[in-house]
Image (spheres, grey):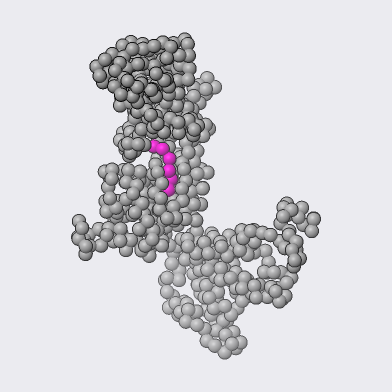
Amino acid sequence: MSRLRRALGDTDAVLFGPFGYRLRVGADEVDADRFEATVAHARKLTDRERAEGLADALALWRGEAFSGFEDAGFALAEARRLAELRLVAAEELAETRLDLGEHGLVAGELSELVAAHPLRERLRAAHIRALYGSGRQSEALEGYGDVRARLRDELGVDPGPELTAVHAAVLRQDPALRAAPRRTAERGNLPARLTELVGRAEAVTQIRALLGTGRMVTLTGPGGVGKTRLAVEVARTLGGRFTDGVWLVELAGLPSGSGPEEVADTVAATLGVRQDGPRDGDSASEPGTARLAAALRGGRTLVVLDNCEHVVGAAAEVAAGLLGAVPGLHVLATSQERLATAGELLWTVPPLDAGGASRMFVERAAAAEPRFTLTEENRAHVEAICRRLDGVPLALELAATRVRSVDVAELAARLDDRFRLLTSGRRDAPARQRTLRAMIEWSWEPLTDPERVVLRRLAAHADGCTLSAAEELCSGRAWTRPTSWSCWDDWWTARWSCTGTGATGCWSRWRPTASSAWWPQGSWSACATGTSPTTSASRNAPTCGGATSATGWRGWTRRRATSVPPSSTRVARATA
């Protein structure tokens, strides 16, 4: 037992119990279980993929089931069951390959199997089809004569209707028996690939696997991270699996807050499904989702719902309704937040890693300026650009177009003003992807007011923050958010509010000095009472005239990249 444990590489693989030793294995570690699972999965696929899957399943066999123990009482029934499943899989594989036009190959490969099982009518029918389709008509007729005689002599029966129908087709030389391989045009509307997808090979594999186990997968992530491009690439690799097409449904054109009917209409228009019928509250009318489901039912379709974030509720309702009514439908969605439907699988799209980001920038820069190449002299600048743009693909593409007019060293230096710099995207790109500012605005617009407040407050942290710091900053305890910001060079703007009575909303301009303290500079704006505030160098805080209980001061600060004072990412606090 110790040697067996060492061979298995797991000391817990062999356990001892009341009834003796027991081998502990998972379902995917038993070849018989893997065989059945692979066959079941292959039956859901298209002809070519089904043939590949069945061949993979049959390749797991290395002899007879329970070889050496097939006649033992404990194994007899299971060995016979597995042997029958193996033959059925072989027959299905033969029929699938015949539908693909592989008559000659199938005829040769079935000869040995037919000799071992001469009375299996389905197997003999496939062999006869293969012989006839490969130009061996006389052998096909001889094969039918042989199986008919064996059935009569050994079992006292005539051939069944399926085998008889194949024989009749051979006699009348039915052209269908020699039909060319079925080549069905893939349906759908996926755009052709114009550029290579960089750094996402592993992501494509993982998302394909998710769609193999679930029917609803949502790709989430911030704007510009490449959700749409990744979803389209995944969908393209799955085209052969969905006989009724792979369809990209663009939801970005819908107004924010659109309802399920508008989303369903957009899906229907993309798929070419007519949505005729009464609308607008007519109780007798059928909902658009129901009509769409009726049109899709019975087929195998993949729908890519792109840019769901601004209609997330409606998109979730439509997706859930369709998935519940159409068993053959799969949905791949992209959104900045999850759809939160039953059965949804999430995959967060990360920014590109350092290597992928550099490669993408170099490729896009070379497309914009053919003379550009990555050298030892400019490598550090390229890496700095990729790092400062956080590996976000859209930002990298926008930056790469600037190589036409500035070198990468200057480009890296100018990224302090990235919103003015990155403004020359592709003309054929959606408006939200033509500039960095437009990309940010697309993500900003769907936010609620409280979410915007939190995001503004978190902006005080230049390079991220801990959870406790975020909670302290965004808790909203005894302080108010500024209504606007103004910055002059290295000056800072702060708004102060006191919890006492009297003046509130005093404004001051501040700037850092050599000391760690913050000192007021310039003049104050008027307080609410009209009384100018006073300042004290010892407190670093204003005192509003007329405030009778000036306690609990809170201030806002905002840093500029050109001036980084000590502790500049912290919210200033003082007590009057």
**x, y (%) of residue 160?**
50, 82
- Where's residue 214, x and y in %? 47, 55
Using residue 152 as the reference point, say whether residue 273 is left or right of it.
left
User: Which of 8 and 295 lies nearest the eye of the viewer?
Assistant: 8
Q: Residue 560 location, x and y as percent?
A: 40, 19
Q: Vertically, is 113 above or below 191?
A: below
Q: Decide whether residue 568 is among the magenta residues.
A: no
The quarter of the picture where residue 552 lies is top left
Residue 59: tell me if it is visible: no
Residue 3 in the image: x percent, y percent?
Answer: 80, 55
Seen in the image, is 497 located left or right of residue 161? left
Q: Nearer the viewer, residue 106 or 559?
A: 559
Is residue 467 at all visible to an observer of this figure? Answer: yes
Quadrant where the image shows the C terminus: top left
Q: How many marks?
A: 0
Looking at this view, is 38 or 258 the one in front?
258
Residue at 46% across / 41% down in the picture?
Answer: 349
Kindly identify the residue that appears in the image at 31 percent across and 19 percent down: 547
Which residue is drawn at the image coordinates 34% and 54% (left, top)? Answer: 317
Question: Residue 445 versus residue 8: which sits nearer the camera?
Answer: 445
**Residue 539 against residue 356 in the figure, above or below:** above
Q: Residue furthest right?
A: 2
The residue at the point 75 percent across, 61 percent down is: 16
Where is the N terminus found, in terms of image quarters?
Answer: bottom right
The residue most toward the front is: 548
Q: Which residues are magenta?
A: 218-223
Q: Residue 31 occupies which quadrant of the picture?
A: bottom right
